Every structure is written in C-alpha cells, then in structure tokens.
Amino acid sequence: MTDSASSSIVRAHTHPNPEPALPDVAADQPALARALDWVGMDGICLPICLPGSGGQLMQVPAQVDVAVDLQDPSARGIHMSRLYLLLQASLAGEMLSAPGLRRLLDACIASQQGLSSAARLALRYDHLLLRKALSSDNAGWKRYPVTVQATLCDGHLQLMLDFSVEYSSTCPASAALSRELNARRFNEDFSEDFAGARPLSNAVVSDWLVSERGMAATPHAQRSRAQMRVELKPSFDELPLQALVDAVEVALATPVQTVVKREDEMAFAALNADNLMFCEDAARRVAHAMSSDSRVSAWTIRVAHYESLHPHDAVASVSGRNI
C-alpha cells in the first residue's frame, strides 16, 4: 500500500463525514450597490474598566454602540461578529483611555479587511464618585451619567465626553421678595405704630429671628441639572471626568449632597443663600469654568432649573471653542 493511499484511509477514518462549508449570504452582491456611511450595532451590554480606589481597576456595566463605514458599494455587509469580539476583549481588560480607544478603533477598521476606513464608538455608563459631606465627618457615593464618544477618521481621533451634574438653584427674585416680606414683618412686630411694640436689643432681635415670626417667607429653590458635552484635546491621554465634574461643581457651588446631617444641611442652606442663581447665571458660571480648562477644545452646556414655582422649566444653553 502506498503512503498516499494510507493517508487517504486515515483521513477517511478520522473524518468519515466532513462538515460542509456553511453558507455565507453576506458574500452575495447587494441588490442596490451603494457605499454606506455607518454600519454596526447599538446597545451592546459589556463591562468596561475604570480607575478605582487604591489604583485598582474596577469593572462597571456599560452599553456600547459601535460602527464602521462601508466603503465598498459592492460589499453586502460588514463583519459584525469581529467587532463584537474586539469590544469584548478590549473593554473588559484595559482601563478606558484615549490611547486605548484609538487602538480599539484601529483594530475595528482592520478587522473589516479593506471594507472600512473609519470607526466610531459610544459608551454609556454611570460613574460613581465618593463625595465628602459639607460639615460632618461623612461621605457618600454620587452617580454621574456619562457618555464617551470616540471617532477615528483619516487617522484623526475625536473624543467627546458627555456628563451631567445636579445642583440646587435658589431664585434671586424670590429671595429678594422673601427679604422684603421679612422686613415688613419686622416692622410690624417692632414698630411704635403697633401696640405691644418691644424695645430693641440684640437678645430680643435674636429671639425674634429664630422664632416662627422671624421667617415671613422663604425663597423657592429646586433641584437643577447642568448637562455638558466637551470635546477633549488629543494631547491628553486620560479621560478627565472627575476633574471636569469637580470644576463644574465648584463653579456652581451648590451640588446636591449625599450624606446629610443637620450641620451639613445648615451649610448647604448657607451655600444656597450665597449663590442665588437664575438659569442664565448658572450657564455663565459653567461656561467660565469650561472656557478656561486646558483639556477642553470645545464645549456645549445646557442647564435646566426644574421650577417649584410653576410647572415648566427654566433653561439656558451656551457653547464655545477654546483657543
């Protein structure tokens, strides 16, 4: 028996019924040939890696959108499973960063074997930051919804970061009217024109101020939200989410709190009194913070005050580009 005949017998014995090749209709010609701007998948559930405490990485759940362009009009479709496997391998094992996103987008383009020249990603997740209480020795976690958008086209990486910050806004007009009513009540209680007028002293006035009579009105305040979209400069490798959140919260001065003891609530009330804001004021404060940030090349801001005075919201928007 020849060697070739023996090999044939071995192959036949090992694979008596070899599996036929599976059909691939994606290789067929499209009925209407045309290049497509973007093709991909939305809403993929995957873990991503973020920096945690002590320099450790932590995995958090995210929803991911991915797409590539389809340059070849004669190609029916892209290789979606390759994109999925790349996302799964990269995002779960490497900290989210600008260089990492560039490498991933490059790999997405290469996986299409000439069909694509551009790729983009969007990652949506909740970022938790530990925030210290205003006065007491406590801290609590606060949630910040985040979207990272990365696009690689002609070798240029564009990084967009969307996030929002909640804060308290006390109306300046309402505060002025409340002060007016408080003054009128003071005059009513201490004027010589009214019966029972009492002589003024520090102790008398102090007792009156902390009594129910000492507050004729309170200004209306409401939970508010500042939504930011910033384009990051490519020279920065990190995604400076916490630094940008800190800058916005410092600018607004009244971010919502987590753990609140009585001393914290008193400090919060004082901050609100010192930072009376219309929505226009809030938008300008955040714009000033973003316009002076060296990591940001462009920004768009929208603030909304969810009014307690009436059933509609007060909103303001502003955008700009840094030199």
Image (cartoon, rainbow, N blue to C red):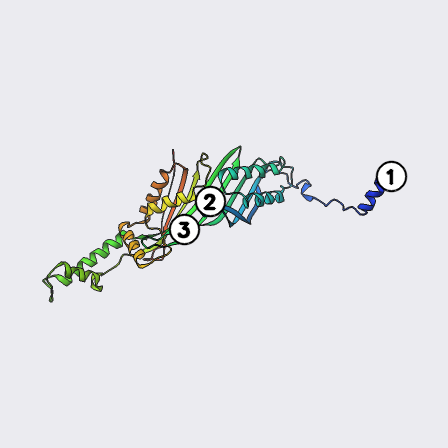
- Give the mark toward the camera: 3 or 2: 2
Q: Are marks 1 and 2 in contact (CB under 8 Å)?
A: no
**Residue bearing mark 2:** 55
Between 56 and 9, the residue placed more toward the observer is 56
Between 259 and 272, the residue placed more toward the observer is 259
Q: Is residue 231 left or right of residue 93?
A: left
Q: Secondary structure at mark 2?
A: helix
> At x 74% / y 44%, what residue is drawn?
21
Residue 70: quarter of image? top right
**Residue bearing mark 1:** 5
The label shown at residue 175 is none
The label shown at residue 130 is 3
| Whole-percent x, y for residue 288 in the image | 33, 41
Visible residue check, residue 34: no
Distance from disc 1 to disc 2, alpha carbons, whole Å, reads 63 Å
Above or below, 287 against 186 in this view is above
* Dot 1 alpha-carbon crowd within 10 angstroms: few under 14, some 14 to 19, many 20 or more: few
| Whole-percent x, y for residue 212 in the image | 22, 64
Distance from disc 3 to disc 2, alpha carbons, whole Å, reads 15 Å
Assign the C terminus to one quadrant of the image.
top left
Residue 218: quarter of image? bottom left
Between 280 and 243, the residue placed more toward the observer is 243
Distance from disc 3 to disc 1, alpha carbons, whole Å, reads 73 Å
| Whole-percent x, y for residue 287 in the image | 35, 42
